[in-house]
Amino acid sequence: MNTSPRQKILIVDDEPDIRELLEITLGRMKLETFSARNLSEAQALLQREHFDLCLTDMRLPDGTGLELVQHIQQRDPHLPVAMITAYGSLETAINALKAGAFDFLTKPVELPRLRELVSSALRLPTAGGLSTAIERRLLGDSPPMANLRRQIDKLARSQAPVYISGESGSGKELVARLIHEQGPRASQPFVPVNCGAIPSELMESEFFGHRKGSFTGAVEDKPGLFQAAHGGTLFLDEVADLPLSMQVKLLRAIQEKAVRSVGGQQETVVDVRILCATHKDLEAEVSAERFRQDLYYRLNVIELRVPSLRERRDDIEALAMHVLKRLAKDTGQPEARLHPQALEALKNYRFPGNVRELENVLERAHTLCENRTIEAQDLRLSEGNCTADGAMADLTQIDNLEDYLESVERKLILQALEETRWNRTAAAQRLSLSFRSMRYRLKKLGLD
């Protein structure tokens, strides 16, 4: 006989028929329900009872569902909240997700969708600090990495679409996998796709599938990536590389939560969480009209930025030690050690290829080194990407201090512009300058 306590759901809605519908549906799922007619009743119940899920209408007689989301975020951030909004209120739903809501439902409430949402929310892990998986797989104790781990832990508890930005090689796919693995969809598929690697003529078939005979070479029915990710997560890497024609179809699939195979007559309902990434500046792509603004807003509900390796130089030693241990295990050889000068060289290198480049550099050095000691020369680092952080210039080589300082300023500004793909606002922020000061310096240096 099962005597475990039933999970408790808080329903907040001023319409009696909606409350009754939700109570009956959730009661049949063996869940215990508590109902509130307004914001103040909900807040009073939250003080007295512990809940496993809250379902709230957006419009309440004495406030809004957003206020309730914010109230819960401050007092019990691990309690999932689902927002119920009027049909077509997409902007409201997005604001709720940004505020911390788990997911949203639209009126009239579809009962299969309601049951699916509730089941998913109740599968979330209970509160208990950062997952050890995130700690173990995202190495580094620098402030940017500590912040990234906290954000992953929070976003894993939501169903909001996430846009993961960051440079090539910084670990965007790993971040996407961790968001998936720490959330309620962990037991379902994680399907990564490199949007830039699919020929444009095959994109629709790859994403949505095709029926036998729908085109030359379609010898059998084939499900697409959306169908393969049903119940799980679809990770769209390098999403900025999608052609505009495909962006329209992707937007429709996300909005309708349904896809139609090439050559098919019926639409198939799909339940996927969308995560996407690109090394490009997606906002700049929108401005250049290479990426649809409406799709950008659907994908970029929440942006998560993965820091470059340059922004967390303090993590380089720990990352290098981890890579060398893995190489020793993979090759069956004794673990190589880094000479202090080699470690210093790594710390002074710009790493345009980020963690991926660090791994490649160490793998090559591991093969070339002698006596299991990696010397600085074994690293074969590109001199153009080496910095002299902390090193004082040779004063005997400086003829004019003003000219020297100007050359250093020019170099640093150009570096910041290159790293931000010539986004002047972002470059100014990276150098801790106001935009006005940045504009003045660009003009002074003839870079405007």
Image: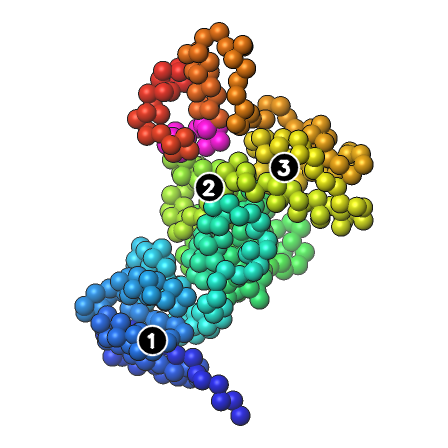
Camera-nearest residue between 198 and 378: 378
Instruction: State the image quarter where residue 443 is shown.
Output: top left
Which residue is depicted at the point 38% across and 64% down? 77
The residue to which callout 2 is attached is 244
Q: Helix, strand, or loop for circle 1?
A: strand
Mark 1 and mark 3 lie on one chain; the one further toward the N terminus is: 1
Per the rendered image, the range of residues in magenta is: 416-428
The residue to which callout 1 is attached is 10
Instruction: State the image quarter where residue 178 is shown.
Output: bottom right
As shown in the figure, which amino acid type bears the numbered disc 1?
A: Leu
Q: What is the CA distance from the residue labelled 1 to the residue labelled 3? A: 50 Å
Instruction: State the image quarter where residue 445 is shown.
Output: top left
* Circle on res. 148: none
As shown in the figure, which amino acid type bears the numbered disc 2?
A: Leu
Compared with 391, 93 (above or below) is below
Which residue is depicted at the point 48% across and 85% down? 4
The residue to which callout 3 is attached is 357
Which residue is depicted at the point 30% across and 61% down? 70
Compared with 160, 119 (above or below) is below
Mark 3 and mark 2 lie on one chain; the one further toward the N terminus is: 2
Q: What is the CA distance from the residue labelled 1 to the residue labelled 2? A: 43 Å
Q: Helix, strand, or loop for circle 3?
A: helix
As shown in the figure, which amino acid type bears the numbered disc 3?
A: Glu
